[in-house]
Amino acid sequence: MADQDPAPPAGFEPLFRSSPFLETVGPFYYRKEPDGSFVVGVRVLPKHANARGSAHGGLLLTLIDIALGYRAAFSQRPPAALTTASLCADFAGAAKVGDWVEARVDVHKVGSRLAFANAFLMVKDERIVRANAVFSRASGALPESTSLPRGHSEG
């Protein structure tokens, strides 16, 4: 069954930016969309499960945080240096081991001091988490090495 395959769906690549924490929790993936934006996703593996066999809320919140932050940061050139200031999430469903979970993000505004974005986590066509975040903006931009791979730009 395709849902039990640990690999990401076609078109997804390893996340373009990582950290020791994300390497431990992941792996996370991204796919460029036709409009120039990108989607971040994760396959729920046995290591991601809670005691009930569903994706742990910490995994889902991590996915939401990186998707919201990266999409907001990369919504402009050069990418903004953002830090999560507030993150609110509501769980309306669950993901089980083997499910592919995608974060669909809507960036509202990236201003001179704050950035605002909303997201849904999706399993197939079902919304399982809704979230919104506020990010504080540091002066300057992310280092050039944190840009999307060549040919991948946020539009």
Image: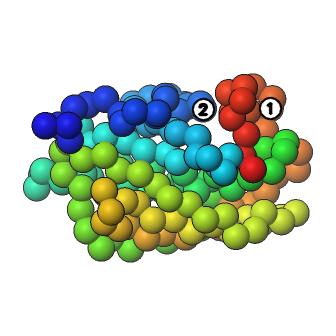
Tag 2 residue:
17
Relative to residue 79, is residue 121 depicted above or below?
A: below
Q: Is residue 84 left or right of residue 121?
A: right
Please name the amino acid that badge 1 sits on. Pro
Relative to residue 61, is residue 91 depicted above or below?
A: below
Furthest residue toward front: 34
Tag 1 residue:
143
Q: Position of residue 48 (x, y in %)?
A: 26, 42
Please tell me how crowded label 2 is: few (under 14), some (14-19), or many (20+) other residues with Cα within 10 Å. some
Please tell me which residue is depicted at 43% across the width and 44% down the height of the picture. Answer: 41
Q: Position of residue 92 (x, y in %)?
A: 30, 73
Please name the amino acid that badge 2 sits on. Arg
* In front of the other: 49 or 9: 9
SS at mark 1 in the image: loop
> Which of the image's four quarters has the N terminus?
top left
Relative to residue 35, is residue 9 depicted above or below?
A: above
Q: Is residue 126 left or right of residue 142?
A: left
Please tell me which residue is depicted at 22% across the width and 32% down the height of the picture. Answer: 5
Please tell me how crowded label 1 is: few (under 14), some (14-19), or many (20+) other residues with Cα within 10 Å. few
Q: Is residue 49 left or right of residue 77?
A: left
Please tell me which residue is depicted at 24% across the width and 47% down the height of the picture. Answer: 99
Q: Is residue 141 left or right of residue 64?
A: right
Please tell me which residue is depicted at 51% across the width and 38% down the height of the picture. Answer: 30
Q: Position of residue 71 (x, y in %)?
A: 64, 52
